[in-house]
Amino acid sequence: MAVKWLPRWFFQLASPRWCYQFIGKLIPWFAAISITLVVAGSIWGLAFAPADYQQGNSFRIIYLHVPAAILAQSFYMLMAIAGAIGLIWKMKVADMVAKSVAPIGASLAVLALLTGAIWGKPTWGSWWVWDARLTSMLVLLFLYLGVIALNSAIESETTAAQATAVLALVGLVNIPIIKYSVEWWNTLHQPATFKLTEKPAMPAEMWMPLLVMVIGFYTIFGLALMLRLRNEILVRERRASWVKELLSVKA
Amino acid sequence: MAFESFTDFLDMGGHGLYVWLCYGLGLVTILLSLVLPVQQGKSIKQDLRRRLRREEGSA
């Protein structure tokens, strides 16, 4: 039975060949936009944003720490949703997305934890505290590492995709825990900078570069995901005639 | 500009080491996340081409 309410591109995305070519067209645009945003956001945040009246210049770490933490969580949700789509509709491309996003998400979780630790030292006087926000972020990293390990331990691509999708979906419970950890428990960690319902507590000259960096991180790590996904498509479709044509034409 | 001089900028009010260490880590993360898949893609294509040629040779 055809699902009529879904747009056509959704089904086209399910074709590895169409996906490979479509992503190939997007890559140069994403490269140009993402590099511009990240360079501009970094210079803006490092040199032009005003210093924080309490934290001084160490607060400039926010322009890396917050985007890395947001992306680590978004990519986790993407991994779980892609895994679920793969489980339910047996969509191969969704499985490939879930597999490709895991190492990127893991490196972002590491970046968020490391920049947080380096920021914590001058601000809280400690590299690490076993606080709810920090601990739940560490759990997020372990979930990513679990997914990566499971992927490499299971030989069958289909079984590996199913097993990692289930693990990713179970681990999804951690995402609201990370989000609300600063409200549910007493913590050293400051509350979220951006909220959907309220204006940021910072002045515009502080949060605007942060917004640029968040969008820059989405696009630059989206680019990394596209590159990985294209590799994954090539490997899994290596026996398909379109891959053989593609390789013999460009030889 | 939030700083008087370039030395001020590097010093970050005494927090230079922390700030620049973070941005160094960020740069490494971004570079690795882009360079590794590009290199991997090249070696995948090479490998598949070699395999394709072998198949054509034996056919």
Image (cartoon, coloured by chain):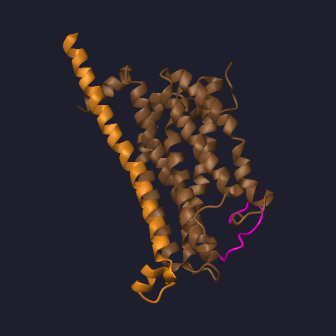
Chain colours: A brown, B orange
- A50 vs A217: above or below: below
* The N terminus of chain A sits in image quarter: top right
Residue A207 screen position, x and y as percent = 62, 71
Image quadrant in which you'd find residue A142: top right
Chief secondary structure of the magenta portion: loop
Image quadrant in which you'd find residue A87: top right
Q: Residue furthest bottom?
A: B4
Residue A111 screen position, x and y as percent = 52, 56
Q: In screen coordinates, is A73 left or right of A179?
A: left
B47, A116: nearer the viewer:
A116
Q: Is residue A150 magenta?
A: no
Q: Can residue A38 be seen from the camera position used here?
A: yes
Q: Residue furthest top?
A: B59
Image quadrant in which you'd find residue A192: bottom right
Q: In screen coordinates, is A246 left or right of A51?
A: left
Residue A130 screen position, x and y as percent = 67, 57
Q: In screen coordinates, is A119 left or right of A6?
A: left
- B23 vs B9: above or below: above
What residue do we see at 70% from left, 66% from top?
A188
Q: In screen coordinates, is A61 left or right of A135?
A: left
A160, B53: nearer the viewer:
A160
Magenta stretch?
A193-203
Residue B57 screen position, x and y as percent = 19, 15
